[in-house]
């Protein structure tokens, strides 16, 4: 794998105020979505979150032999997810103290939250798709906002659901949400690595470069012979 490709992916990992602001807003939207059982708000939370670049950087760094860079990308990812989780808790608390939503309703069984506090085949499938599609998109330099949304589907809802359940005192469902979050992170990174091993980006470019070099050498030799 070319160092240039790895460094390009790593450079996409931003640690500026915009990244942390968007992750915070994503957590807030996710909390409101779960409290109100609103699918549109949950979609908005996933669209806002710039969660994929750090995940891609981990896979590419490991595949490229840069464990320290992978560690740094993980720190950025965990920092953003932690902010989203804190934002979800604070938002829930504000809704409670202002009586917008009573605390008793936090643990009311709601489909949106229930689906994000247990590991199911659909959540694993979302993580697999995010890891595979995201890695191919990065290799082809065709990153799309929708790829980031798929990655956020696997992270933000699970983290926010776990946080909301923990705040409400339901440790069982809280653990389920956080386990789902950890599993999805591992699956996205692992699938990204598998795709990189299978595709081996940079191999085609190297072959093309060698071929072009051979053509140039042949042309030069012919020119010298004609002279």
Image (tube, rainbow, N blue to C red):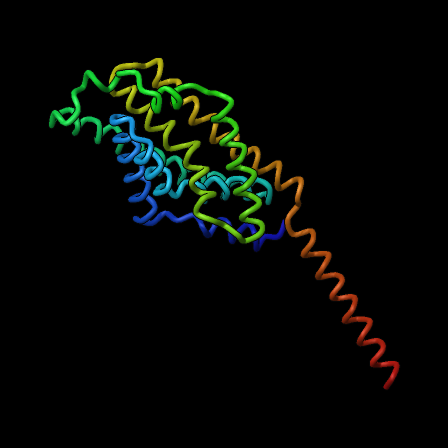
Q: In this figure, what is the number of numbered marks?
A: 0
Image coordinates for residue 168, horizontal then vertical, percent: 24, 18
Residue 18 visible here: yes
Q: From what the image shows, is residue 186 above or below residue 25?
A: above
Image coordinates for residue 63, horizontal then vertical, percent: 60, 41
Q: Residue furthest right?
A: 225
Residue 214 lies left or right of residue 37; in this view the side is: right
Q: Quadrant of the C terminus?
A: bottom right
Which of 102/190 is in front?
102
Residue 105 lies left or right of residue 121; in this view the side is: left
Image coordinates for residue 207, horizontal then vertical, percent: 73, 56
Q: From what the image shows, is residue 102 above or below residue 45?
A: above
Q: Residue at x 31, y 38 (%)?
A: 26
Q: Residue at x 45, y 44 (%)?
A: 146
Q: Residue at x 14, y 27 (%)?
A: 100
Residue 93 occupies quadrant:
top left
Residue 83 visible here: no
Q: From what the image shows, is residue 191 above or below residue 178?
A: below
Image coordinates for residue 199, horizontal then vertical, percent: 66, 44
Residue 213 lies left or right of residue 175; in this view the side is: right
Q: From what the image shows, is residue 212 above or below residue 61?
A: below
Q: Residue furthest left?
A: 98
Which of 64/88 is in front?
88
Which of 84/4 is in front?
84
Residue 77 occupies quadrant:
top left
């Amino acid at each position: 794998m070319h160092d240039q490709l790895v460094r390009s992916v790593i450079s996409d990992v931003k640690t500026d105020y915009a990244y942390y602001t968007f992750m915070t807003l994503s957590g807030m939207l996710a909390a409101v979505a779960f409290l109100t059982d609103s699918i549109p708000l949950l979609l908005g939370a996933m669209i806002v979150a710039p969660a994929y670049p750090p995940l891609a950087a981990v896979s590419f760094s490991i595949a490229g032999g840069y464990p320290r860079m992978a560690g740094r990308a993980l720190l950025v990812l965990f920092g953003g997810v932690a902010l989203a989780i804190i934002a979800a808790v604070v938002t829930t608390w504000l809704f409670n103290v202002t009586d917008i939503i009573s605390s008793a309703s936090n643990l009311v069984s709601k489909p949106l939250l229930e689906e994000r506090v247990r590991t199911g085949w659909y959540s694993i499938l979302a993580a697999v798709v995010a890891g595979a599609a995201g890695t191919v998109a990065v290799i082809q330099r065709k990153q799309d906002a929708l790829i980031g949304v798929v990655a956020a589907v696997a992270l933000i809802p699970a983290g926010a659901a776990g946080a909301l359940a923990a705040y409400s005192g339901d440790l069982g469902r809280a653990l389920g949400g956080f386990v789902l979050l950890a599993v999805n992170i591992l699956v996205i990174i692992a699938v990204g690595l598998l795709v990189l091993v299978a595709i081996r980006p940079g191999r085609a470019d190297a072959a093309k470069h060698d071929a072009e070099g051979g053509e140039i050498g042949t042309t030069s030799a012919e020119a010298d012979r004609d002279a």
